[in-house]
Amino acid sequence: HKIYHYDRVESTNRTARELASRGVPAGTLVVAEEQTGGRGRMGRGWFSPHGLGIWCSVILRPAVNPMDAPPLTMLAAVAVARALRRVTGVEAGIKWPNDLLVGEKKICGILTELSAEMERVNYLITGMGINVNIDRHQFPPELRETATSVLAETGRRVSRVALLQDLLAELEYWYTLWEREGFAPVLARWKEMSVTLHRPVKVFTWKESWEGWAEDVAPDGSLLLRLPGGERKKVVSGEVSL
Ligand code: BTN
């Protein structure tokens, strides 16, 4: 697969979209040393300082309906968590749908963007931001309580190349398994690493929020909540606070 490496871009997701719409093949990777306008979920930004993290996006072209795309983001979370554990020793938990946390702090965020035509995914961009060699004090003050990095957790700098190589191998493994056997094996791994299940949570969407018990994740990746009145709620997308 081809890798596009940049010193500085606005957002690797944006660059990947441009490349994807020009027809580059599935499996293409865009990676940058620095992002000047890194994007996060829910309209937020993503702190992406030069040379200190893995800011990358993979272009995928899965032959699925757009409704079946969320599991692919959860697949990426599993891949990052395993690569982080093997290469750095950091044990991150997955917060639904795809944040990687150490304790309560985020070490990796994943943002998927998708283009679809006629009920078919045209391309899917999975953007991953991994905080690697960022010193605790280098985070802006407003992120210090909510963000962490490999360096902050272990006191050691690690090779971003080694981590990215392992991540790409993991992504390939889980993606191939998903193509062959569907989402169940991926979801089983996701559940093992989840820090969201079997506990009380608060879930926000753009317009609503619920408090309830996180019972399970459905085969399509939705979060299954039990509300205080006993009613069950299936949340397709949103943000969890623990
Ligand atoms: C989140 O809000 O948790 C998702 C953050 C995703 C950040 C990554 S960094 C590489 C890619 N390019 C972007 O602009 N965002 C994603």
Image (tube, rainbow, N blue to C red):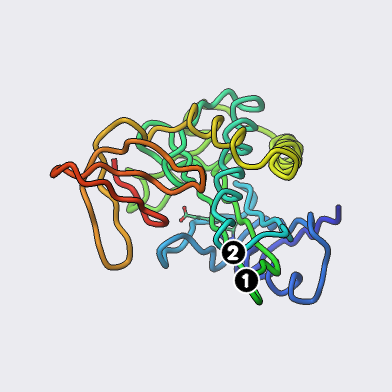
For marks 2 and 1 on the same chain, the one whose residue lies earlier in the sequence: 2
User: Is the shortest distance between ligand 1 and the CB of mark 2 under 8 Å?
Assistant: no
- Provide residue 126's location: percent of width, then percent of height: 63, 56
At x 62% / y 33%, what residue is drawn?
185
Q: Quadrant of residue 9?
A: bottom right
Instruction: Answer whether labels 2 and 1 touch (C-beta < 8 Å).
Output: yes
Q: How crowded is mark 1: few (under 14 residues within 10 Å), some or many (20 or more)?
A: few
Q: In this view, does 92 lie above or below 13?
A: above
- Which residue is situated farthest in the right direction here? 1
**Image side of residue 67 versus residue 86, left or right:** left
Question: What is the three-letter code of the residue carrying label 1?
Answer: Glu
Question: What is the three-letter code of the residue carrying label 2?
Answer: Pro
- Which residue is situated farthest in the front direction here? 231
Q: Quadrant of residue 206?
A: bottom left
At x 63% / y 48%, what residue is drawn?
54
Q: In which quarter of the image is the C terminus?
A: top left
Q: In this view, does 193 lie above or below 149?
A: above
Q: What element carries label 1?
A: loop
Where in the image, quadrant-wise, is ligand 1 located? bottom right
Disc 2 to disc 1, C-alpha distance: 6 Å
**Image side of residue 105 versus residue 30, left or right:** left
Q: 66 and 99: which one is in front?
A: 66
Q: In which quarter of the image is residue 170?
A: top right
Q: Is residue 9 above or below residue 71?
A: below
Q: 140 and 212: which one is in front?
A: 212
- Provide residue 27's location: percent of width, then percent of height: 79, 54
- Provide residue 76's location: percent of width, then percent of height: 61, 45
At x 72% / y 57%, what residue is drawn?
62
Which residue is tagged 1? 119
Q: Of the numbered discs in the image, which one, if any, rests on residue 66? A: 2
